[in-house]
Image: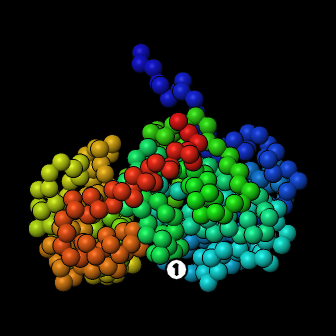
Amino acid sequence: MTSDASATSPRTLTGLDVLERDGCSALSGARVALITNPTAVTRSRRHLLDVLIEGGVNLVALFGPEHGIRADHDETFRVTSSVDEATGLTVHSLFSDITRPTADMLRDVDVLLFDIADVGVRYYTYTTTMAYCMEEAAVHGLRFMVLDRPNPITATRVEGPVLDPPFRGLAAHHRVPTRHGLTAGELARFANHEYGIGCDLEIVRCENWQRDQWFDETGLPWVNPSPNLRNLNQCLLYTVCAGIEFSQIAVGRGTDSPFEVFGAPYIDGVELSARLNDLTDWPLRFVPIEFTPRSHRFEGERCGGCFLFTTDREKLRPVEANLRIACELEALYPSQLDARRSERLLGGPAIAEAIAQGSSADQIIASYQEGLADYEARRPQYLLYA
């Protein structure tokens, strides 16, 4: 009879699980505003709102990030403020002309509570929203609490260029590599110190989680971190595809396989797949495919391209893969691809310009190693987990 190792190993708990177990005592007597979305669930799939209400926490407002607090705004580039039907609380949108809480929104607040799943990649608006809210908490003398969650693609691997500061924005704010190797709580610690925010920051840590664990090794329930990231494989391949998605490339948005396919009307999928499969020593395979996005880039147009999958997620270096794909696309389609459009995602104009000028992927990867090494030297002081 074989034993089930998962039955005897300690259960991974998120910060929310810990808060629930402790009866929400860390929020006792405080007026609390939430920055959250549907990913804020316990191991038993109870949402943060239900946990706080049952725990007698005094909720005074909700703040919604990109896609909205219920993640039901995929196709919109702005989310309007509203009233949450379940609680009667005002939901202030932070994905509109307003991207951070105002003084009026924070007038009756003591604690800003953040619980949103991250995907471990720099270009993600939720952790930018977290940093903006931390800055406002510092200005208004509020506590800022992060209920931490595991990095789904592990937090041991660090890869890619560090963001060029002049190119910070909502889509890419943190001065970290593309794959930063931090949890949201650790990234909050990094931001609080590195950017001089200095807010009253508290992290409710995960328990029984190790940095090298993938999400599917935690036993935690999966909730889509955003509408186009529907499984762990897509989270990993997000870093392979999304870095150049502003460059006249469709990356599967508006299809049933976001970030598992990429292409464009001008691409010959057979030619591109053969070329990418001939690249040696990387655990990715490419299959020719045609697809028609129902929305987003090239909506309604037939695209040639590739379906991709990894043969070894432990060995895959997704940022380097993204750059190698970009260089091959530039070589094949120099008049259609424009890497400069993706400079915010790539980390700044230097990387984008190098692709556009025909530099090799190896040259580009070598160009950012000094900045990456500097980050890796500073990163350990912000880590919370072994």
Image x and y of residue 257, in percent = 35, 63
Which residue occupies the foreground of this view, 56 or 318? Answer: 318
Could you tell me residue 215's position as x and y percent? 47, 45
At 20% from the left and 54% from the top, the residue drawn is 285
Q: Is residue 325 above or below residue 53?
A: below
Question: With 26 as the anchor, is 206 left or right in this view?
Answer: left
In the rendered image, which quarter is residue 321 located in?
bottom left
Residue at 85 percent of width and 50 percent of height = 28
Looking at the picture, tell me which residue is in the foreground, 128 or 126: 128
Q: Residue type at mark 1: give it.
A: Thr
The residue to which callout 1 is attached is 76
Picture colour scheme: rainbow
Circle 1 SS class? loop
Extreme residue in the right direction: 29
The residue that appears at 68% across and 46% down in the rendered structure is 204
Residue 360 lies, with reference to residue 182, above or below; the image says below
Asked whether, in this view, residue 349 is left or right of residue 39, the answer is left
Tell me the quarter of the picture where residue 249 sits.
Answer: bottom left
Q: Residue at x 58, y 59 (%)?
A: 194
Residue 346 position in % (x across, y down): 36, 68
Apparent side of residue 282 relative to residue 370 in the rendered image (left or right): left
